[in-house]
Image (cartoon, helix red, strand yellow):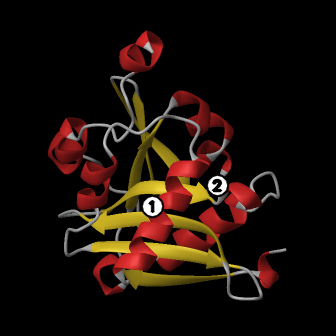
Amino acid sequence: MSSLFFISIHEWLDLSHAQQRALLRHMTTSFEKPWADQELLFRRFLRPSCYVALYKNASGLPVAAALFWKESTFLYLDKFFVMAEYRQQRIGMPFLTALLSSTTSLPLVWRTDQTLATRFYGKHPLVRTLGSHGDYVYQYSTTQTRRSWEYEDIAPLLRMESAFQPKAMRDAT
């Protein structure tokens, strides 16, 4: 299956405004949670070190995407998703493998919930868990020699607000 797909990585700021908005539309429809603030989400990706990895089919159409940026000692994977019309086609794991193979210069770190940490990301042989903080599980993958992580390494992530509406807000509606 993976031979029918390929990955391409682009700087977010090199994409046209229309391409950026289309990707955000795909992203917001692929997750099954309400977003807190769409404009805040858009601005989150305007940092100069933000990249988008597109997983494309043989026709060159994107079927999945990941948005990530460079922190001081690692790459932070902020969003990883399969586009809604391609879900349930076993695209996620081949895409994750392609992404991990494409980002070997620095460790790739992300935060997720307990379910995805064990049922999806945790199934990949290169994925390790750093620990948890609040509702998040912090995981990473690297092909480099394992190094010990310090609190300072991921401190910016611990303070970053969720892009999704808080559960209390969702329950109130």
| Residue 155 located left or right of residue 76 | left
Residue 162 figure quarter: top left
Residue drawn at point x = 40 percent, y = 50 percent: 110
Q: Label 2 amino acid?
A: Pro
Q: Is residue 61 visible?
A: yes
**Residue receiving disc 2:** 125
Q: Residue at horizontal 37%, vertical 83%?
A: 15
The reply, left or right, for residue 150 in relation to residue 123 is left
Name the residue tied to disc 1: 24
- Residue 90 located left or right of residue 28: right
Mark 1–mark 2 Cα distance, whole angstroms, equals 29 Å
Q: Nearer the viewer, residue 1 or 172?
A: 172
Residue 172 point in image, percent of width and height: 42, 11
Q: Residues within 10 Å of mark 2 (few under 14, many from 20)?
A: few
Q: Please tell me how crowded label 1 is: few (under 14), some (14-19), or many (20+) other residues with Cα within 10 Å.
A: some
In x, y percent, where is residue 80? 52, 57
Circle 2 SS class: loop
> Looking at numbered disc 1 in the image, what kind of residue is underneath it?
Leu
